[in-house]
Amino acid sequence: MPGEQRVALVSGAARGIGAAIATRLAADGRAVAVLDLTEESTRDTVARIAEAGGRAIGVGADVTDAAQVAAAVERVAAELGPPTVLVNNAGILRDNLLFRMSEDDWDAVMAVHLRGAFLLTRAVQTHQVAAKWGRIVSLSSTSALGNRGQANYSAAKAGLQGFTKTLAIELGPFGITANAIAPGFIATEMTRAVAERVGVPFEDYLVEVAKEIPVRRTGVPEDIAAAASFLTSDEASFVSGQVLYVAGGPKA
Ligand code: NAP
């Protein structure tokens, strides 16, 4: 539907990478649904988009809950229009070495990353298929290649890569592309919490991590937003089923 404003839904967009993606997609001209656990938490992101002249609403939903996801997608369709751009970004960490990892640590991470992406994608693809156009981007991670203390997270992030490739095959005939972005180290509340857990001030932690990254800096959420902007653009219609590592080098 050329000429009409496309609607993007970004999960986990109250802060961090999701907030940067939502802001960037709004700047690209999309109307944006900023989804996070509570509508209240999305206020800052929604306000920032509106201040920049964009169009956004905040939506509260737990991506692991099928009924909440269905209601959220319906609300977006009613208030902004059918969502045809989806960014599966909501995520949590429950790091522990395998012998200390609880079943809850495992299940919680699988639920948010994998079940959440499945539920949101299933709900949104109805609108994408109807529009015969769609863009799906899911947040994987360099941890998909393996990372000590992250058996749950790395399995989920590798799982999202397989999910993405299958979506590309199933949904391609409807003009829908599916890709994954695998960030390396990005400075957000998530990585700040990791620094706190190992007892290192965040600023010092960033300096240490940057030494190991080929471009000699840590990432910022806008690095990921730029990749999401490309993968959700009209021009990216022949790029599908790919995993784009955005990590300042070939791997973590
Ligand atoms: P973040 O700052 O922790 O933000 C994640 C957001 O997701 C939070 O607002 C969180 O809400 C929300 N969320 C968590 N569970 C949810 C649920 N069940 N339903 C809806 N929203 C939920 O994380 P980030 O660093 O921006 O990371 C964003 C994505 O990139 C994640 O998928 C992460 O795994 C991935 N990633 C990050 C890095 C990195 O270095 N930062 C690297 C690779 C991949 P609450 O705050 O209320 O919990």
Image: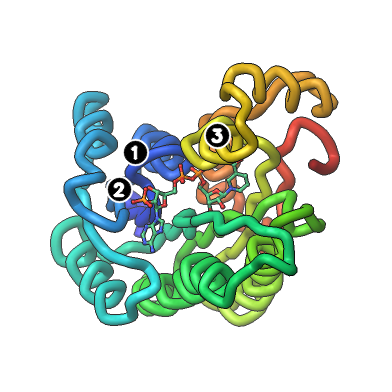
Q: Can residue 60 be seen in this view?
A: yes
- Which of marks 1 and 2 precedes in the sequence? 1
Q: Which comes before the other along the chain, label 2 or label 3?
A: 2
In the picture of the structure, the residue carrying the numbered disc 1 is 26
* Mark 2 → mark 1, Cα distance in angstroms: 6 Å
Above or below for 63 versus 27: below
In the image, what residue type sits under mark 3? Glu
The crowding category of the residue bearing disc 3, from other C-alpha atoms within 10 Å (few below 14, some 14 to 19, many at least 20), is: few
Q: What residue type is labelled 1?
A: Ala
Indicate the secondary structure of the residue bearing disc 1: helix
Residue at x 23% of width, y 55% of height: 38
Q: Which colour scheme is used?
A: rainbow
Look at mark 2 in the image and give the residue it sits on.
32
Vertical side of 11 occupied by 112: above or below: below
Describe residue 81's horizontal placement relative to residue 144 as left or right. left
* Residue 70: quarter of image: bottom left
Q: Residue visible at 34% across and 38% down?
A: 26
- Indicate the position of residue 206 as horizontal and vertical percent values: 65, 23
Whole-percent x and y of residue 129?
Answer: 42, 77
Which residue is pictured at 62% across the width and 56% down the height?
95
**Which dot marks residue 196?**
3
Q: What element carries label 2?
A: strand
User: Which of the image's four quarters has the N terminus?
Assistant: bottom left
**Where residue 91 appears, x then y in whole percent?**
49, 56
